[in-house]
Amino acid sequence: MRNDIYAQPQTGTSLDECEFYHTCEIPGIGLVEGQWDLRHGLAQYLGNYDFTNKRVLEIGPASGFLTFHIEKTAREVVAMDLPIDLKLWNFVPYDRLRIGNNPTPQGAEVEKSFRAHIERIRNGFWLCHEKFQSSARVCYSATDELPKELGMFDVAVLGSVLLHTQCPTKVLECCADLCTGSIIITELLDRTLGDAPICRFLPSIENDLWHTWWNFTPQFFTQYLSVLGFTTLTVSTHKQVAFNQEIELFTIVATRPSTMSRMNQK
């Protein structure tokens, strides 16, 4: 396996260079507060999945709270994040903003601020990586172009990621190609969408929602994952603390039938 697809660990990052997506207790530093606090609902967020001795692909690690938790029992964790270039984010291509493509002054400022924010979140990841003495590896790649050189994984984790992607089905297809066992998806639960396998397009001319594309029903994913060959599916709902309020989410654990057969033989 090629090692040059992985980023060199960043060391020596200071706390004042960082932001944190998740609230976390960092060794030698203490508690840092983030937008989400999953500390009391982490098992539910990850579908009560047992990562023991698994090779894990995590899509979108943010500041790494899930990464370093999963790593406690997993055989290996590879975190896939977006490069700091025009593929940094699946920006919604608002005509009047033209983010990333001959931007207007307003669009340029939006993108500049967002990139600075992501850089600080990424610094938070590397600070935690160093303080936790983590061996997790990071690959910077587009979410719908995962390098085959990564090899195969037992499980892929996508925690609150797909709502930010232009083509979530393509991202799932790429993960499925590299995953021999299970895929775990956690997303916001919008009960107004009902029980059909649908997603709702969120950006409009009124809201300028350039960073988020979709809301989903769980059935949207269970139907598509079964098409991809993940036929054993569990769906759970739970509440997590974010932005100082409780938010309801759903988690899907989808497993290929060959994996279930091996598990039943043990």
Image: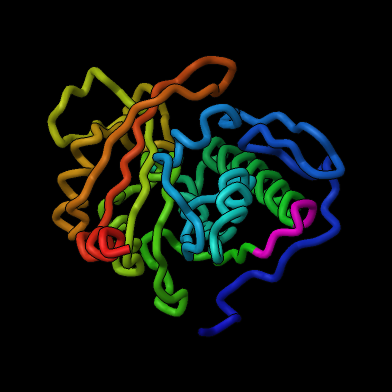
**x and y percentages locating residue 41 in the rendered image:** 52, 29
**x and y percentages locating residue 214 in the rendered image:** 31, 35
Q: Does any portion of residue 242 appear in the rendered image? A: yes
Q: Does any portion of residue 93 appear in the rendered image? A: no
Residue 173 colored in magenta in the image = no
Give the number of marks. 0
Report whether 170 appears left or right of 44. Answer: left
Foreground residue, 234 or 82?
A: 234
Q: Is residue 263 above or below residue 242?
A: below
Can you tell which quarter of the image residue 28 is in?
A: top right
- Indicate the quadrant containing the C terminus: top left, top right, bottom left or bottom right: bottom left
Foreground residue, 40 or 220?
A: 40
Q: Main secondary structure of the magenta part?
A: loop
Can you tell which quarter of the image residue 22 is in?
A: top right
Q: Is residue 3 above or below residue 230?
A: below
Q: Residue at x 19, y 59 (%)?
A: 228
Q: Seen from this angle, which residue lies furthest top?
A: 245
Q: Residue at x 40, y 64 (%)?
A: 154
Q: Seen from this angle, which residue lies furthest front?
A: 266
Q: Residue at x 54, y 22 (%)?
A: 241
Report whether 131 appears left or right of 84. Answer: right
**x and y percentages locating residue 167 in the rendered image:** 29, 51
Q: Is residue 28 above or below residue 101?
A: above
**x and y percentages locating residue 247 in the rendered image:** 45, 20
Q: Residue at x 14, y 55 (%)?
A: 227
| Span shown in magenta | 130-135
